Structures are given as structure tokens and as C-alpha cells.
Image: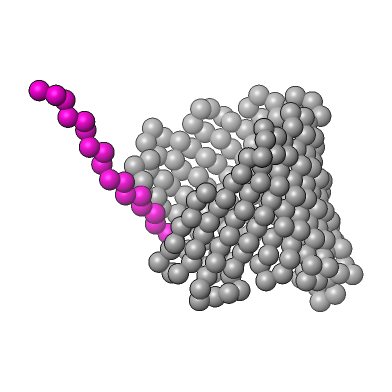
Amino acid sequence: MISRINIDGSVNGRFCKKINNNIDCKLNFNTYAKNDTRNMYEMSLEVNKPLYTYNFKSIWQGAWIFNTSYTQLLTKKLQAGVDLTYIASNCASIGSFGLRYNHKNNVLTMQIVRQPNFKSPEFMLNQTHLYKIQYAKKISDRLSLGTELEITPQTKESAMRLGWDYSFRHAKVQGSIDTSGKISVFTQDYSGFGVSGYIDYLNNDYKFGFMMHISPSQEQPQTAA
């Protein structure tokens, strides 16, 4: 069990219970004293078997959200899964099917998502299909590259993204760029200092952040004279 109280008055907590070797039960919550609309409570039950995994999850965040997923290992390299989400407030459902193929330093994933077109006033009557294909390759022990193509035929929208991850001896650099004019970079030093930046050229949106971890130095044990 883990709990944390932040300076903004929010309280975060997590409780995990391992029922047996295959079943895990988890409870997460975020509460805000000054803003009840940001409160979130989540309970999940996960069953892990050597060849398959399924999960049941219920979430309260101003409205009930229910989710279930199932993953099956077809071969040593190929994996398939389905996911279904139901939003009780507007009776909307989101379903997806995906495949994952892993061979040496290459990972290929494909996903099909069927969901309402939430951009439309009558979104329940306008169902859209989203197609995603992702490819990642580990070039070396330090460098990994990945790309993603996303297509929505009904709305004639598409996006392509490229990302990278490079590890130095004492630092790590991660970044991504896509065809919609968005660029993001995150740099972290293993001593605890990090810098992040996000730029959206089309919407003229710029964000930057800093992170620092300060850990007290451990006292060296004194040797007996």
C-alpha cells in the first residue's frame, strides 16, 4: 500500500493485493479537496496465465467507466488482444483489436479501433474506425527508433510520428516529431535532473518543464578502531 499527500491538497493512493500466483487485485484513487470533479477511483482485477491474460476494471471519475481486455499468446513471437470500454454517462462504447509481433530487435504492432466520432454533435450515430501501425527497432544497446502511422478514413485524418530514445552513460534523451507540427524532447540525467519541452507550431503552444530529484546522502558505516 502506497499513499502520498501533495502540497496542492490532493491525496494519491494505491493498494495491491496478490490473491494467488495468477490473480492480482488493485485499487487506485486520486482525491482533490478543492476540486471534486478531478476525483478518480479505480478498481481492477487481473488474471495472468502463461498463455493468456485478462483484466476487468471499473473507474469512477464523475461518471462510471468500465473496461475489460483479453490478451492471448498465439506463438512465441505473435500476440493478439481485444479491449472494450463502456462509458455509462453517454452509453458510448469503444472497442479495439490488436496484434503484436516481436522478432529479435524488431517490434511490429497493428491496431483497429471502433469508436463514436466525439467531434460530431450526433457522435453516437457516427462510428469511426481508427487504424494504427507501429514499428520499433533497437539499433544498438543505446539507440532505439520507432514510427507510427494513424489513419481515420471517415474523417479523412491521418498522422505520422517518429520517435527516438538514446542512452548516454549518465543521461537519456527521448524525443518525437509528427506531421501535425508537434515536437517533444525529454532529457534526464541519472543524477536526478531532467528537462522537457513541447512545441505545437500549428496551435502556437509552447511548454517547458524541469525536474529534480534530491536524495540525502547515505552515511558510510564507521569501521571499528
Between 18 and 60, the one nearer to me in the picture: 18
Q: Is residue 13 magenta?
A: no
Against 1, is 4 above or below?
below
Image location of residue 40, percent across then percent down = 61, 64
- The image's colouring method is one colour
Image position of 212 with respect to 24: above or below: below
Which span of residues is magenta-colored?
209-225
> Magenta stretch containing residue 217, yes or no?
yes
Work out whether residue 3 or residue 159 is closer to the camera in this orientation and state it: 3
Residue 136 falls in which quadrant of the image? top right
Horizontal and vertical percent position of residue 77: 74, 26
- Give the side of residue 103 with respect to residue 173, left or right: right
Q: Is residue 106 left or right of residue 31?
A: right
Quadrant of the frame with the C terminus:
top left
Image: 140 above or below 98: above
Q: Is residue 101 visible?
A: no
- Taking 18 as reference, is 88 above or below it? below
Q: Residue at x 70, y 29 (%)?
A: 102
Residue that appears at 48% across and 66% down: 10
Instruction: Give the x, y percent position of residue 142.
Output: 49, 31
